[in-house]
Amino acid sequence: MIKINQLMSIYNHKTPFEFKALHDVNTTFEPNKIHGIIGHTGSGKSTFIQHLNALLLPSSGEVIIGDTIINKKTKAKVFHKIRRSIGMVFQFPENQLFEETVMKDVMFGPLNIGIDEETARKNAEKYLTLLGIDESEYEASPFELSGGQMRKVAIAGILSMDQDTIIFDEPTAGLDPKSHIEVMDLIYNLNREHGKTIILVSHNMDDCYQYTDTIKIFSHGEIVSEGDTVDILQDEALLTSMNLELPKVARLTKDLKARGFNPNPPPRSTDEFISMYDMWRSSHAE
Amino acid sequence: MIVLNDVTYKYDDSRRAALDNVSLRIERGDWISIVGANGSGKSTLVKLLMGILETYEGDVSINGIKVTEENTRALHKNFSIVLQNPDNQFVGATVEDDVAFSLENLEVPREEMLEIVDTVLQEVGMLEYKKHEPSRLSGGQKQRIAIASALATDPDVLILDEATSMLDPQGRRDVLKLVQAVHKKRKTTIIYVTHDLTEVFRSDAVIVMNQGQVRLKGSVDTIYSNPHILEENNLVLPFEIKISTALLNQSIMSYAKLVRKL
């Protein structure tokens, strides 16, 4: 369980450039779920996730991860413990590839946090396989891969540290449609098949609707709304007030409600919509 | 007019052709979209159109003149490009410097240069950011500055190479709207490279690429009426079309019409 109490984050504190990025954030992340974080550029999302693995320390308030408390006085030796339990996939993680081979790059993270070589290799193989990177690529230079493949190798490098919670910051930005679906399916599987807690920062309302269990909306450095994904992302008034759009499937389901199409639970993806509507239509016709 | 006839290109270290017998015609003032997944040959085609690739097989001509090693610079002089990652193309310390860069290279007199910079910044709605540092702008704003820089030389052809793919939804909409305005006002030929099929609806023609080949070309209607070809080529159908194809057996393009027909 991750718990955040009265978290405040101020950049350039006590200087003329002081900027309060987060004020009074209180929330929890239950384990084994996929949590979505949405909000406009500049709403505080990125600052917030950096607090979750102690890349930033609270100006006041605290972040509690399991039995570890992070506050403004937390010492560096605690960071190590935090980072063994929370992994972070930054935006455009492929920019951080640097090793000579795919395998060396993926093993760098686990070796660096003190995992033994055999386990590191086993983890690397497990996650490279899960990401669809073929064994024949293990000894290739990561820089010879396509953009989508580079992204996957970089993600495998984080996953190989085998943390319980993984934070993804806009993991599909810039990917082509096929790689986009592959990466989102992977994130879903990490949760559903491998029990990881996922925190997903995304601008893509359709992905959030399809793949997450809960949603937190950030605006001006605060969480303005949070709850179950379906409740939040069907709330048109709320989303409009935040200048966000309804997910496309939610919009279409809503617009067809007057005709009697009102399934519960509602479809969350385009494919689900198609099969549910098709069934409803054929039962309707009889 | 740009004409490609049976153009094939291989990178030095590759066995497979990055462009494989590509033929196409781009009329002056048209908006052409080139769509395809990563590795489909889109970017190689862009390099060819910019006149950066040499030693290809086949013919390329611009306005009826065949492109050769000797005349390629002259023929491509009025081509401008906007790239995927705006951070890779900033050279100036301020927005103004950045937009002026290409004009300085062309030795445009200072007075005239300042006038052009103001005009293009006004056109992209970024005049008030003239003295700002490019690095402090949002992604969408950066791309608008990149478009302003591209427009400063008053190009005949403006190429956008996945210019929206790294932007948030608002940034995407802003850039797409700006390209529409530029196309309408300046009658610039637009070559718009993307993997997002929702961004092609303003095009006069769409070219679908995969494995270096042109797999489908035609009007937006033609493209959207061939959902299976799009899917075969690793593209994802726009929401409305995916649903109408599956449930109505036709490719309805507008959301309002889809709701009516369902």
Image (cartoon, rainbow, N blue to C red):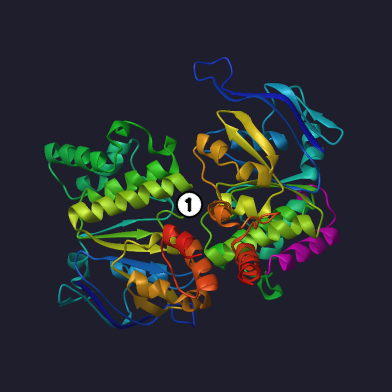
Of B69 and A266, the residue lying toward us: A266
Q: Amino acid at mark 1?
A: Met
Q: Which residues are magenta?
A: A112-132
Corner quadrant of residue A124: bottom right
Q: Vertically, is B161 above or below B150?
A: below
- In percent of width and height, residue A101 lies at 66, 65
Of A215 and A112, the residue lying toward us: A215
- Could you tell me which residue is drawn at 38 percent across and 38 percent down? B134
- Could you tell me which residue is drawn at 30 percent across and 42 percent down? B98
B162 relative to B236 in the view: left or right: left
Q: Is residue A116 magenta?
A: yes
- In percent of width and height, residue A107 lies at 74, 58
Q: Is residue B73 visible?
A: yes
A65 relative to B152 in the view: left or right: right
A34 relative to B236 in the view: left or right: right
Residue to which mark 1 is pinned: B166
- In percent of width and height, residue B14 lies at 49, 79
Of A127 and A183, the residue lying toward us: A183
Q: Residue furthest front?
A: A286
Main structural element of the magenta stretch: helix, strand or loop?
helix
Secondary structure state at the residue bearing disc 1: loop
* Chain letter of the residue beneath label 1 in the structure image: B
B156 relative to A17 in the view: left or right: left
Q: Vertically, is B230 above or below B200?
A: below
- Could you tell me which residue is drawn at 60 percent across and 57 percent down? A260
- In percent of width and height, residue A218 lies at 60, 34
